[in-house]
Amino acid sequence: MRLPLTTFRSKLLAAMILVIVGVSLATLLVTQRRVQATYERTFRTQFERQINYFTSLQEARLGNFQEQCLKLAQSVRLIAAMNEREIDTAILYQSAEDELREVLGNPRGGVGPRRPRATFFRFVDAQGQPLIAPDSARGRAFSAALRRRIEQRLPFLKGALTSAELQQVGYTALLTGTNQFEPLSPLPSRLPGASRRPGLEAARGELHEVIVTKVVNPEDSRLLGALVLGFPLPDLIPQPRNPALRETARTNAHELLQAGILLEGRLHANPLDIPEDLGDFVAGRIADDLQQHMATHSDFPCEFGGVHYRVFYDLMNENSVFPPAYQVCLYSMEEALREQRGLRFKILGSGAAALVFGIIFSLFLSHGLAAPVRDLVGGTGQIRRGNFDVRVAVRSRDELGELAASFNEMADGLAQKEKYRTILNMVADEKIAQKLLTGQLTLGGELREITVLFCDIRGFTPLTQDMPPGEVIEMLNEHMTALTRVVKEHRGVLDKFVGDLLMAIFGAPLHHDNDALDAASCALSLLEARARLNRTSRHQIQIGIGLATGTVVAGCMGSADRLNYTVLGQRVNLASRLCSRAQAGEVLIDDGTRQKLAHHLTVEPTGEIQLKGFSAPVQAFKLIGINA
């Protein structure tokens, strides 16, 4: 019995399912990857534009201020004031206010209150120690407590003072509402991963850009000090002015481009862009990524609050003595995920529909293919069992139809050959017929040592003279059928029937171990078979048998169109003459057979007898039995 998965129909169905499922999954995978790659490429392009936008804004914002600071640092009055043993801070700051009125606030005499553009400015000496402003209108802005905090927060200026550049731009944070510096590391590390991770309770400060301009004596290039200016960093992305729009932006913050600057482990951004808890989470992830990869720019995916983001960061102040500052952009992947889910639903839906259609189509196709194949399998089984009359239906005109038609033609040919084989077996011995069919017997002969057996009915003419021809034929058929069976049982070859005579050969065309002994045993069995048949048949028949052993010519005799396998020679004639002299129920053998089977046979000499066709008398023996 065939297993369900081994049938042609099940294999075709399984192959169809695997192909459709494989194509659907491959399409889904490739599509998702392409969608994700497209979004990531778009995000990366937007991030690069954001960096370029920020750089251009910085150049436009600080370019004029940097030029004015350099001009002030080269002022003869300023250099002279800082070159004194006891620096007169009043002159120093007065010169700065006169030169940097546009930077520090409205010009004197302007209408309205002073609105400084720079959040703070300060001079430091060559050792980086702040030079305190006098108790003036601007000096009062720096109380004693504030001065102490500033003095504690400015050690990073030492790096700027020892660098080769005349001017350095960096980033720092001031505590909101106090204009104080946020805590800075005394010696900030330049390793990208050295930024500390913030605590959730850490205070958030306003991010500032700091310009440090060195004051150098032009005569001996000696460092006299530096001017420090700080400017609040504007929003990276403008926010809506309308309160309703701002609230909508806050609600849908995860759908916007979210940008900020990471400085010393804290992400500074507009709360509408990046909420505080999200900023702390992203800052921690960037710190981990920096520590792992030690790169100045990279990107990675993350998930926060059920929202998937793509985070990009890039170092803004490479080769600077200031603490490293990274521009950070968050891009929500929700739209990409929604599109992927939509594509997944569409592809899987299309795949499911294709699968259903494929199953139906494969069932229909497999039925059209399996039915003819199943018919052919059944037909071959019938052929194997010998039923050559089987035919299969020709269902189509394709290759399967041609195969079915060829099968029917083959069955016709096999049936015809089987008829020929049956007829041949009826007119010739089965062994001879098989060799004739295989082409092993051709016209011609060869010398073979064999034993020839003749069996004849005693008193056949008186027995049949008053018998109708039909009854004669019926009697002979019954008689010959029983004797033929005995001959075959003893590996003999039935040569021919001649009237009531039967001729058999032992040793040709096939040779066995002891053909003469088989022939003697067959002769005695023929007598027993006829005796048994006499007990049941209405015709009482007696037979006589003659045996002769020797060399004869064995082969196909006749013509190329009609031939007969037989044996010729003196031993054949001798066996025929012995048969004619044997009495009813006797088996006469020649001296050659007796000598060949001397230790196996029990015989009784009959003396020399004169036979027709033999000039000299022949010594014959009556076969009594075979020794065990």
Image: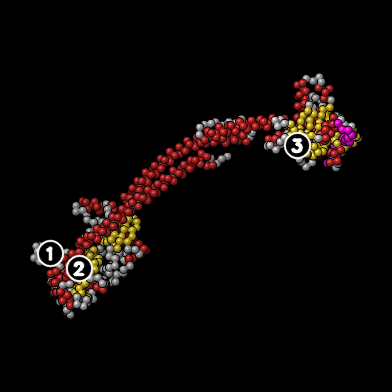
Could you give the CA–CA distance between mark 3 and mark 1, rounded to whole angstroms?
139 Å
The disc, 1 or 2, on the residue closer to the chain's N-terminal end is 1
Horizontal and vertical percent position of residue 528: 81, 32
Task: Choose between 309 and 27: the one closer to the eye.
Answer: 27
Determine which residue is flagged by label 1.
Answer: 106
The residue at 22%/64% (across/down) is 208
Determine which residue is flagged by label 2.
Answer: 229
Task: Choose between 151 and 230: the one closer to the eye.
Answer: 230
Q: Which mark is residue 445?
A: 3
The residue at 84%/41% (across/down) is 596
Task: Choose between 606 and 571: the one closer to the eye.
Answer: 571
Task: Choose between 278 and 528: the one closer to the eye.
Answer: 528
Numbered disc 2: secondary structure: strand
User: Which region is colored magenta?
Assistant: 613-628
Q: Is residue 372 visible?
A: no
Horizontal and vertical percent position of residue 163: 26, 72
The residue at 71%/34% (across/down) is 433
**Quick one: quadrant of the C terminus?**
top right
Disc 1 marks a residue whose amino acid type is Asn
Where residue 206 sits, quadrant-wise, is bottom left
